[in-house]
Amino acid sequence: MHELAKRDLEAKPDGGGELLLAIILLVTPSVFGFLACLVAKNSYPGSGLWFFYEVSRMVGYLGVALGACLGAIALHRRLVTPVMAIAMLSIVTAAAMMSWYAGRLSKLIW
C-alpha cells in the first residue's frame, strides 16, 4: 500500500487537454450571452435576443461555477500541468467577467 501511495505522489500530471476542453464547453453559454447582449445593444434592441440572453445567462452562471470547481479540483489533485491550470482558470475568469459585463449591459438595453 505504501508503494502505491508513493508512486501516486511521484507521478507527473498529464497534459490536461480533455479538462481544458470540458471547461471551454462549460463556459460557452457565457460567451453566447455576452455576444447576444452586444448584438442587441448595437443592432436589434427590440428583438427576441433577450430570451437567448436570459437562457445563456442562467446556464452560463452554472457553467462558470462548475468550470471553476473542475479547475480547482484538477489543480488540487495535480491532474494537470501548471500551464494548463493557468489556462483553465483564465478561461473561467474571462467567462465570469463576460457574464458580469453582459448583465450590466442588459440593464441598459431591456
Image (cartoon, grey):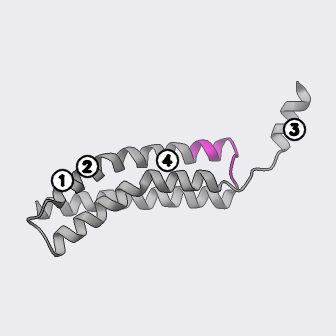
Q: Earlier in the sequence, mark 1 or mark 4?
A: 1
User: Mark 1 highlights which residue?
Assistant: 51
Q: Residue 10 versus residue 35: which sits nearer the camera?
A: 35
From mark 2 to mark 4, how far is it between C-alphas? Answer: 20 Å
Q: Residues within 10 Å of mark 1 (few under 14, many from 20)?
A: few
- As measured in the structure, the alpha-carbon distance from the residue carrying label 3 to the one carrying label 2 is 46 Å
> Does residue 69 sit above or below 20 in this rendering?
above
Q: Nearer the viewer, mark 3 or mark 1?
A: 1
**What's drawn in magenta, residue-wise?**
72-80
The amino acid at mark 1 is Phe
| 37 displayed left or right of 98 | left
The amino acid type, in three-letter code, at marker 4 is Ala
Please give the residue where the numbered disc 4 appears in the rendered image. Answer: 68
Q: Residue at x 23, y 55 (%)?
A: 52
Mark 3 and mark 2 lie on one chain; the one further toward the N terminus is: 3
Q: Position of residue 101 (x, y in %)?
A: 29, 62
As helix, strand or loop, the secondary structure at mark 1 comes to helix
Is label 2 in contact with label 1 (beta carbons under 8 Å)?
Answer: yes
The residue type indicated by label 3 comes to Arg
Residue 7, numbered label = 3
Based on the picture, tell me whether residue 92 belongs to the magenta stretch: no
Report if residue 78 lies within the magenta region: yes
Task: Quickly name the residue at label 2.
Answer: 55
